[in-house]
Image (spheres, helix red, strand yellow):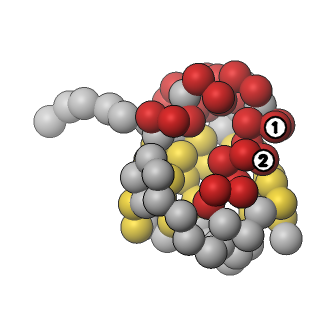
């Protein structure tokens, strides 16, 4: 199943695009597929949170995913 993953900030810069489509059924699989498609993400992805339908799975979280869900890759950021 193809899932569109939205990339932001440093993740977008590393991938050189704002989104990628990957085949995955879990977040762990998704991370591996993202790096396979955009190898420069390997340096950024370990610091990123994965957001599935607005719920953060942090850096190490895992869950089942499907193509109906919104998946965002959010690098750490600061601000107020």
Identify the residue position indicated by label 1 in the image: 36
45 horizontally vs 2: left or right: left
Label 1 CA crowd tier, 10 Å (few <14, some 14–19, many 20+) = few
- Taking the view exactly as shown, the residue that stands out farthest to the left is 80
Instruction: Give above or below for 69 relative to 20.
Output: below
Secondary structure category for the residue under label 2: helix
The relative height of residue 58 versus residue 75 in the rendered view (above or below) is below
In the rendered image, residue 2, in percent from the top left (x then y), is placed at 83, 64
Which quadrant would the C terminus be assigned to in this image? top left
Q: How many marks?
A: 2
**To which residue does mark 2 refer?**
33
The residue depicted at 64 percent of the width and 56 percent of the height is 28
Could you say which quadrant of the image residue 57 lies in? bottom left
Alpha-carbon distance for marks 2 and 1?
5 Å
**Label number found at residue 72:** none
Tag 1, which secondary structure?
helix
Q: What residue sits 20% from the left and 31% below the top?
A: 79
Identify the residue shown where x is 85% and y is 71%: 1
Q: Residue 41 appears at what percent x and percent y?
A: 65, 29
Residue 64 vertical placement versus 3 (above, below): below
């Amino acid at each position: 199943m193809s899932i569109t993953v939205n990339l932001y900030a440093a993740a977008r810069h590393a991938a050189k695009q704002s989104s990628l489509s990957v085949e995955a059924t879990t977040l762990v699989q998704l991370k591996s597929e993202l790096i396979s498609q955009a190898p420069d993400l390997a340096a950024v992805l370990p610091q990123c949170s994965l957001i599935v339908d607005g719920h953060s799975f942090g850096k190490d979280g895992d869950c089942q995913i499907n193509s109906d869900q919104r998946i965002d890759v959010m690098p750490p950021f600061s601000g107020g």
